[in-house]
Amino acid sequence: MKQIGVIFNPFAYRNKRQTEIQINAFKELLGKRGRVCVTKSKDEIPKALKGSLKDVEILAISGGDGTISSVISSYMNLFGEENIPIIAPLKGGTINMVADDAGLRYDQKATCRTLIRYIEDEYELPTIERGLIRIIDDRLDFNNYAFTWIDGFLHKFIKLYRAEGANVGVALKLILKSGIMSLTTPRHYLFEEVESKIFLDGRKLPFDSHLFIAAATVGRLVFGFRLFTEEVKAGEEFGFYSMSRAFFRKALFQLPRYLYLGVHSDASGNFINQPAKNMKVEGNTGYVIDGEVYDTEAPVDLTLEAGPRIKIFSLKGKN
């Protein structure tokens, strides 16, 4: 019988309200089929993966912003990019992007129950394949792997969101507030362009600044945004989205269309929406990967590459 491992982040918004209840529920559900590891910091994740979770075939992740990237990155840096376990994302924060993409619409315990039912009944476990983005930051002695990478306006917005409480109410308030400010105070720091040179698949983009950039291998981002017009080939490319402040002002009253329906690139280069295999950023001043904020004291150079494919437990198309 396949063994299930659970990495549980007790500080995730959904988990910290009922930590002991959640942990005990997982242990009761899994019984002899699995092991639950509580990791109170990123530094504890490698120890859990090298210890009681080393040989699990399914790795369930229960956490908030950045937890899924931290777990997968730790695994890749410890054991290499091959033979990673099947990932089961359990809802609890930005990880919801991956869970929703896999059709896992239920809460953490319901997803675990479904997973166990497949294993006990010896059904073939349904999965989808998704690619990762390999993020190379020369300041770090390891690579990060993620489903999403963003900077500029979205980096500043998420920092503000986390500072004010990081919940649905805060998100809705800030989205409304940002929309109003974009009309009344367009010179607000949120809307200042980021100065950095971007090379996409070896070609320099025409401008040396942008309002924000997003790169992703999943179809929907936070708040259900469906930005990308083309599906990407898992393990070969990622979706790339770039917008200038001038284009943002021009498209403001059509923003729902740009955020939820996807719009093709503008010929001027002020707005780009296309798949890419590689991106180099010269002079980045802060970014977010899968909800976790990375700040810089001075501008840094980064490389983003299409990373390895992984399998994710999925109920897409299942009743």
Image (tube, rainbow, N blue to C red):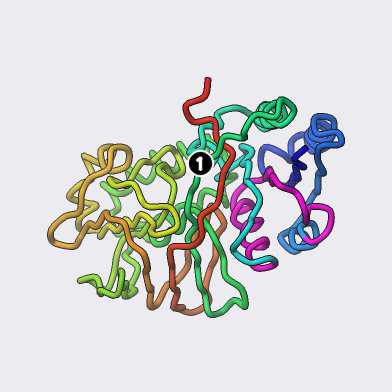
Find residue 82 and report its horizontal and vertical position in percent: 60, 61
Residue 179 can be seen in this image: yes
Viewer-proximal residue among 59 and 292: 59
Residue 159 can be seen in this image: no
Which residue type carries mark 1? Ile
Q: Which residue is mark 1?
A: 128
For the magenta stretch, what is the residue range? 50-78
Secondary structure category for the residue under label 1: strand
Find residue 240 and report its horizontal and vertical position in percent: 33, 57
Q: Quadrant of residue 12?
A: top right
Q: For the point 44% across and 47% down, which residue is it? A: 218
Taking the magenta stretch, the answer to whether it contains residue 264 is no
Taking the magenta stretch, the answer to whether it contains residue 70 is yes
Q: Quadrant of the N terminus?
A: top right
Mark 1 surroundings: few (<14), some (14-19) or many (≥20) residues within 10 A? some
Q: For the point 48% across and 40% down, which residue is it? A: 171
Q: Quadrant of residue 207?
A: bottom left
Q: Going by the image, does 266 lie left or right of 116?
A: left
Q: Going by the image, does 39 lie left or right of 102?
A: right
Rendered position, 251 above or below 138: above
Q: For the point 57% across and 43% down, which residue is it? A: 312
Viewer-proximal residue among 212 and 159: 212
Q: Going by the image, does 172 lie left or right of 46?
A: left
